[in-house]
Image: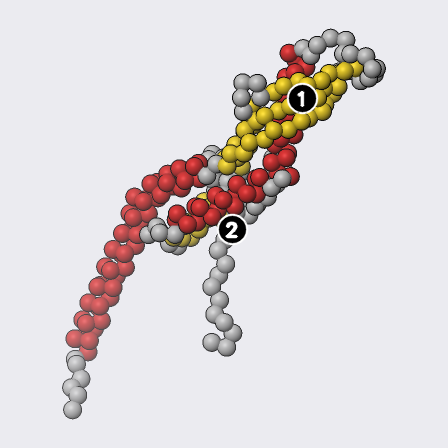
């Protein structure tokens, strides 16, 4: 025959269990908070460093035709194109035990590949094609042409898929690197074709989709 415990003893046992559970929950919450404060800055630093290292370099050798004033100019440009990422704009948000990181905007830098990376091949008078240019290119005119060339090479980086390739490579390598971390880090790219200044606003990290059970369960 099972003996019933006195009501006072049952209340004491229940109260003791509540104290134990409350203490465990408080310790768990405090430990999680301290762990996040301790690891977050270090983890963010590692993320920034890895994104910074994901830079794509491309060599280009192009012939361009342009005009400045009344002069038509044909030039050859040998340049290095670096596609990196804006580390000052690295959106990230923590949801539970997962850190979501949005791949930041790309930064495209165009540099002359060699000391003579810019070479003028021909100059003529637009108004009188059979006549030579009245004067050689001035420094100011050459600077205007070089600035336009950098803009055209930057546009080509988008049109030829170089930016997309750089973002895909970064997403792939970063996801693989973070797969072994104790904390779960998810790298997201909402703009795989690039952020193109003025075309798209900065994107917040999306909220993770809620977990739903299959129907019928």
- Asked which colour scheme the image uses, the reply is secondary structure
Looking at the picture, does residue 73 appear above or below residue 162?
above
Q: CA distance from mark 2 to mark 1?
A: 46 Å
Q: Quickly name the residue at label 2.
A: 206
**Residue pictured at 51% horizontal, 51% vertical:** 206
Q: Quickly name the residue at label 1.
A: 75
**Mark 2–mark 1 contact, CB under 8 Å?**
no
The foreground one among 201 and 80 is: 80
Looking at the picture, does residue 135 appear above or below residue 180?
above
Q: Position of residue 22 (x, y in %)?
A: 25, 61
* Callout 1 crowding tier (Cα within 10 Å): few <14, some 14–19, many ≥20: some
Q: Residue furthest top?
A: 135
Q: Is residue 55 visible?
A: yes
Q: Position of residue 60 (x, y in %)?
A: 59, 31
**Residue pictured at 50% horizontal, 37% vertical:** 56
Helix or strand or loop: what does disc 1 sit on? strand
Judged left or right of residue 124, residue 189 is: left
Q: Position of residue 68 (x, y in %)?
A: 73, 18
The earlier-in-sequence mark between 2 and 1 is 1
């Amino acid at each position: 025959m099972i003996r019933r415990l006195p009501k006072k003893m049952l209340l004491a046992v229940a109260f003791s269990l509540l104290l134990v559970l409350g203490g465990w929950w408080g310790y768990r919450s405090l430990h999680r908070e301290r762990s996040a404060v301790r690891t977050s800055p270090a983890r963010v630093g590692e993320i920034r460093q890895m994104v910074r290292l994901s830079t794509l370099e491309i060599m280009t050798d192009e012939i361009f035709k342009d005009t400045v004033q009344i002069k038509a100019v044909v030039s050859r440009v040998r340049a290095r194109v670096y596609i990196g990422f804006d580390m000052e704009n690295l959106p990230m948000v923590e949801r539970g035990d997962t850190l979501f990181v949005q791949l930041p905007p790309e930064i495209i830098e165009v540099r002359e590949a060699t000391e003579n990376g810019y070479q003028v091949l021909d100059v003529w008078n637009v108004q009188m094609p059979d006549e030579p240019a009245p004067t050689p290119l001035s420094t100011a005119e050459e600077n205007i042409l070089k600035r336009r060339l950098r803009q055209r090479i930057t546009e080509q980086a988008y049109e030829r898929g170089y930016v997309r390739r750089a973002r895909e490579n970064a997403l792939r390598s970063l996801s693989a690197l973070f797969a072994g971390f104790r904390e779960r880090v998810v790298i997201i790219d909402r703009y795989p074709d690039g952020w193109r200044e003025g075309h798209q606003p900065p994107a917040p990290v999306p909220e993770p989709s809620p977990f739903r059970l299959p129907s019928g369960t």
